[in-house]
Image (spheres, rainbow, N blue to C red):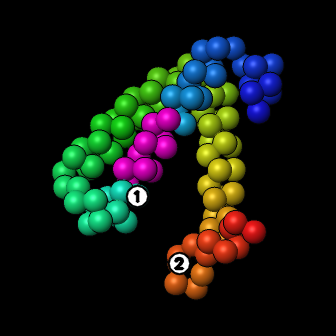
Amino acid sequence: MAIVLTVSFDLSRIAALGAFAYLALDMVVHYGHLRHLRHQTGAKPAPLVAAIVVDAVAFAGFFVYRIRTDLVVIASFVVFAVLVAGGETLYVRRYSDADGTMNDDEVTS
């Protein structure tokens, strides 16, 4: 993937894709913590929600800037995000039990 990016894009486009990926990942991790782990870790919801909002504002601002200047980066990120979400969905369907928990025996074998 790194070779394809290097050949296809200049450094500013690669950096923009990385920024989009980081902000999206950060929001997903905070949301997952808020929804699934907050009670186990004792985290208060306010800082998690604040982090999601700050990431969303930065993502939206960067998105608006890039959509005006470089649609190729936006299209590439959308394709990347769809591929990752699709792969994650297939993985979870394959390796989760009926109750939604991961089956460690199948994953390790």
Residue 3 shows in the view: yes
Q: What's the amino acid at mark 1?
A: Gly
78 vs 84: above or below: above
- From which residue to which does the magenta span run? 22-31
Question: Going by the image, does 84 lie left or right of 67?
Answer: right
Are the residues at dot 2 and dot 1 in contact (C-beta closer than 8 Å)? no
Q: Which of the image's four quarters has the N terminus?
A: top right
Q: Which residue is mark 1?
A: 32
Residue sitting at x 68%, y 67%? 107
Q: CA distance from mark 2 to mark 1?
A: 15 Å
Q: Residue furthest bottom?
A: 98
Q: Position of residue 85 (x, y in %)?
A: 62, 55
Q: Which of the image's four quarters has the C terminus?
A: bottom right
Secondary structure beneath dot 2 equals: loop
Residue 41, labelled with which disc?
none
Q: Position of residue 63 (x, y in %)?
A: 48, 31
Residue sitting at x 22%, y 60%? 42
Secondary structure beneath dot 1 equals: helix
Residue sitting at x 19%, y 55%? 44
Using the rendered view, name the quadrant where residue 79 is placed.
Answer: top right
Residue 100, labelled with which disc?
2
Question: Going by the image, does 41 lie left or right of 80?
Answer: left
Using the rendered view, name the quadrant where residue 53 is placed.
Answer: top left
Crowdedness of circle 1 by 10 Å Cα count: few (<14), some, many (20+)?
few
SS majority, magenta: helix
Q: Position of residue 57 (x, y in %)?
A: 34, 35
Using the rendered view, name the quadrant where residue 58 is placed.
Answer: top left
